[in-house]
Structures are given as C-alpha cells and as structure tokens.
Amino acid sequence: MTDEMNNAPPPPPDWLQVESRVLEAQGVAHRADGKVVFIEGALPFEQVSANVHRSKNNWEQGTVTAIHRESSQRVTPGCPHFGLHTGACGGCKMQHLHVAAQVAVKQRVLEDNLWHLGKVKAETILRPIEGPAWGYRYRARLSVRYVRKKGEVLVGFHERKSRYVADMKVCPVLPAQVSALLLPLRALIGSMDAVETCPQIELACGDAVIAMVLRHLQPLSHADLERLRAFAQVHAGVQWWLQPGGPQTVQLLDTGGTELSYDLAEFDIQMRFRPTDFTQVNPHINRVLVSRALRLLDAQRQERVIDWFCGLGNFTLPIARQARDVLGIEGSEELIARSRENCQLNQRRSVSSQTLAPTEFVARNLFEMTPALLIQDGVADKWLVDPPREGAFALVQALADLHQQKVDGANNPATAGAQDWTPPRRIVYVSCNPSTLARDAGLLVHRAGYRCSAAGVVNMFPHTAHVESMAVFDLIT
C-alpha cells in the first residue's frame, strides 16, 4: 500500500461500502451500527451513496444514487431501456454486471442452496454452460397496452416493479429479427379495431418461423384479420396464431405454412412444437444442455433409461439414439400425444445406422408418485429428471422410501416386489430452481443412498436472476 493510499481521508459517513451481492441484483452493505443495507444497482467492492426507500429495525433497502468507486466488473448495459429509473424495462436485472461475473453469482447461488437447504456438497463442480449473451430469447410473453392519453400502443415487458408496460423500441435479448418487429407491432395494433382488447402477444421462434400468439378478448373483425395477414406477408417468417380464450383455444390464423421446429443436430433429431408448448427459451443453450446431459448420463446400448418430466421428448429422443429402450413420463396427455408424434417423425427420419431404440411415452401425475407406482414402471439403469420449478419431491421421496424399506428389511404389502426392484445407478437432474433441486438432493443423498458426484450452472437466461443447473447423483454401492 502506498503512502498516498495510507494518507487518503476516510470516506464520508453516508457512503456505503458494498461487501457482497444477492441474486436479486442488490449489493449488500452495513452501516456503522451493523444495520444491513440492500442496494439495488450496486456491485461488490463499490463505494456508493443510496436513497433508502424502505427501512426496518434490522435492515434497509434502497437504490444507488451515486457510485464513488466503481467495480471492475461493472459494464455498460447493452440495452437503452435497462436501468433503475422510472419507466425502465424490468425484463433484465444484471446487464450492468459482466456476464462472466453473472455466471459466478449463479454458481455461488447453486452451491449455497445445495449446502444450506440440502446439506449437500457436489464432489465436482461442472464447468458452466454458457452461450450468446444477446439475441438468445426465442420465447417471450409481451404485454400490449393502449395508452389512451398518449394515443399510442406499447408492446414489451413490464417496467421495473410495476404493472405498466415499458416503452420499448428495441430489445437486445430477443433475436434481432424479433427486436426489429417491436415498433411495427405497435403500429399494427394501433391500427386495429381491437386496439383496446388485445392484451398480450406470446412469441415462439423456431428455426425458420416466428410464431406470434395474439390474445384477444373480443372476436376480431374481418379488417383486423386482414391486417394481421398483411403484416405476415411484409415480415418474412411471421406466423399469426389467435387465442380468444385459454391455451387450448390457440389456433393458427391460416392453415398451412412451415411448422414450428428446432433441430438437435448432434443426434439427428427434429423437435416440432406448438407456440404455447413448453420449450427451452434459449435454443443455443438447450443444444449444449442436451449434449452435456447425455454425456453425463452415459447411456449404453444394453441399458434402459427413464426420462421423468419428458415434455415433448427433448431429452427422450436423443437418449433413444444411445440406450436399449426408453420410457418418457409426463403429466399431460396432450404433451404425451405430441411426444409420440415427434418420436414417429424421427423414426421415419432415421437411417439404419442411427435408429431410435424402442421408446414408450406414458402420462402420469408425477406430483403424486408412490413407491408402488415406481415399482410398476420397472427397473431402469439410469434416470433423466427434468422437473418444473416445483421440483421432483414426490418422485425422489418414493425412491428414498424404497431404499429405506430395503435398509430396514421391512415387508410392506403395498410395495410388493420392492425387494426385487433396483434403483437407477445414475440420475442426471436438470433443474430450473436451485432451492427445489437442493431439497431433492438432500433426500437423494441422505435417504436414498446416493452421492452428488457433480453439479454446475446453466446460464439459460443471461442478464436475469434466473438460475438453471444440472446435478449428477450416483448410487453408493
């Protein structure tokens, strides 16, 4: 330390030294009396001033007003609508933090959740899965609002901490061709008879199609339908779907045209989907995610694999290129029907040297799993588990109960055949919620006889606080 630094005057008492950061884009500092201050917009190791807008006995919450010493990890946001000011878009929370540091924050969140919630430490930390930081969001739900006082239509995400729609003209996290449509969409809706009764446009991009699902609260006039058709003719690749009610009412405006699909080229798989189906938001990361998951699963030609929460077959069908046979299980009969369609499509596309293994799809409520149902599904060498945010508690609990029954030597009539049933040797668990992953990991490690051999993050949503991850559990023999 130089004499100049030693002789530097202490910072003013109202300046805050940011020590760390929580996931929700807030820096953490302490006042002289020990009171914690959460500061939106501040980064670790910065000295800042903040405007406190909420105060409790033990903590305060505020927004940064000035940065007196800047973090080396601070970057200029890539979107003109990002910020802390009134009216700023709330779609992203971390654009001011270098993307590599964002990944490090998410990795720390994963490890902290595994330990504090599940008392689990991964033996190996996997290298993070990363991809493009911009133009990645192939799915989005955009709000539409006609502002009568201004006589204009807004199309975009909501403002930060607000029900109002941000005045967005571009969105760099959307594909460039979609971002370029924001202003034309505003003009289109503004020209329609239904300008006040179209609250939402849901976007779903395939490899060759931009599907737009227009939610409309009243039947559309003939003139409005013609306006939508004209828009699709002018903007190549756009395909309009109409949604007068719930998701089951979604219909393509005009029959024919290119179907929505994406390819998993490494496995010679094409996945077709509808715009309201669940598919991964980031197709670039999804391709790497599937590849990494299958390498970790390491399915062999003599092995049987179960894909729990299989969706449309995103993991199931690539696994069927490697295993002896595959069972995909999902809670929705409709999804299972389309999984079967995708399976048939890819069986027709297969060449003799790269055929799909026998693949079965079953619909079942996976949030009501029991040990008896687990036995009914038969023995599998390996599992792939990819649940929604709620996690896979019932499934993992059933597995743990069967393990404990064997350990105790109990004979339960409700689980006849349990002594002959064997658990999977390996489980690859893909998660979109680190807290439910940690809860399920705790059950697997402490009650089901597994060790957590590896875990790592997947940066599916750059610039947001959303944490996706993957963990590997191996049976202790």
Image (cartoon, grey):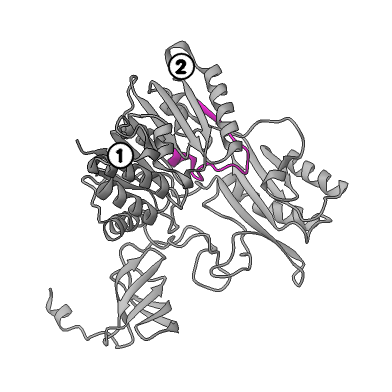
Percent x, y of residue 457: 34, 48
Look at the image and tell me whether residue 235 can be seen.
no
User: How busy is the neighbourhood of tag 1: few (under 14 within 10 Å), some, or many (20 plus)?
Assistant: few
For the residue pair 247 and 11, the one nearer the viewer reads as: 247
Closer to the camera, 292 or 454?
454
* Image mark count: 2
Of callouts 1 and 2, which one flags the residue occurring earlier in the amino acid sequence?
2
Mark 2 sits on what residue?
355
Q: Position of residue 450 (x, y in %)?
A: 25, 42
Per the rendering, the mark at residue 411 is 1
Q: Residue at coordinates 38% horizontally, 20% vertically from top-left?
A: 324
Q: Amino acid at mark 1?
A: Asn
Counting from the top left corner in percent of width and height, residue 475 is at: 25, 38
Quadrant in which the C terminus is drawn: top left
Mark 2 neighbour class, 10 Å CA radius: few under 14, some 14 to 19, many 20 or more: some
The disc at residue 382 is none
Instruction: Give above or below for 252 relative to 195.
Output: above
- Stretch of the chain drawn in magenta: 269-289
Q: Report how far apart the C-alphas of labels 1 and 2 lie in the structure.
A: 42 Å
